Image (cartoon, helix red, strand yellow):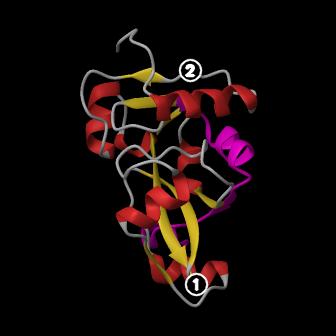
Amino acid sequence: MTDAPLPPSARRVADALHAAGVAGQVVVLPDSARTAAEAAAALGCEVGAIANSLVFLADGAPLLVLTSGRHRVDTTGLAQRLGRDRVSRASAEQVRAATGQAIGGVAPLGHPAPLETVVDVALAEHAQVWAAAGTPHSVFPTTFDELVRVTGGTPHVVADDEVPAG
């Protein structure tokens, strides 16, 4: 972890965290945290404790899904749970337009405008989770409850392996 000044997009995230009353600070890692596996290795935590910020299009509108790093989002199931016709992965250009951030560093907040957000219920299994902070090298610590609060997100099952049997 470094003490260097924050890059501009990480600074915007840090400012948004401060404005939201989040105590966790943005940390800049010497190695990439572009993927959940890279972030978990750099932080010494379980991959499931990494909150991936993924942008999808739900019936054409941006949808931010904060998912546990151990999951793949089941877009068909998520569309059904949200009452949408279709949920599909956004392009790199659509991600940047919606968040102001590049894929691999998308944070849960600090975007040009609020995004509809879904928070993976599996993140609640971890006392502390880590989320990207605007760049592939910056992260911040948080909790499931805090992610729901600061994003205005809705907790949902997002992966087919989370759906309860019955």
Horizontal arrangement in the rendering, residue 19 relative to residue 163 (left or right):
right
State the mark number for residue 25.
2
Q: Are marks 1 and 2 in contact (CB under 8 Å)?
A: no
Q: Position of residue 100 (x, y in %)?
A: 50, 50
The image's mark for residue 163 is none
Q: Residue at x 65, y 78 (%)?
A: 82
Q: Residue at the location (46% across, 38% down)?
A: 134
Residue 147, percent across and down? 64, 43
> Are there few (<14), some (14-19), or many (20+) residues within 10 Å of tag 2?
some
Count the marks: 2
Above/below status of 158 relative to 126: below
Q: Which residues are magenta?
A: 141-166
Q: Nearer the viewer, residue 160 or 36?
A: 36
Residue 165 can be seen, yes or no: no
Residue 30, image x, y percentages: 26, 21
> Would residue 11 be found to the left or right of residue 50 on screen?
right
Count neighbours of disc 1 (C-alpha within 10 A) and say few if under 14, some if 14 to 19, many if 20 or more.
few
As drawn, 119 above or below 162? above
Q: Secondary structure at mark 2?
A: loop
Secondary structure under the numbered disc 1 in the rendered image: loop
The amino acid type of the residue labelled 1 equals: Asp
Q: Quadrant of the C terminus?
A: bottom right
Is residue 148 shown to the viewer in this render?
yes
Identity of the residue drawn at 51% across and 75% down: 57
Determine which residue is flagged by label 1: 59
Cα separation, mark 1 vs mark 2, equals: 35 Å
Snapshot quadrant of residue 7: top left
Q: Is residue 128 above or below residue 57?
A: above
**Does residue 40 sit above or below 59 in this rendering?**
above
Left or right, residue 67 beside residue 116:
left
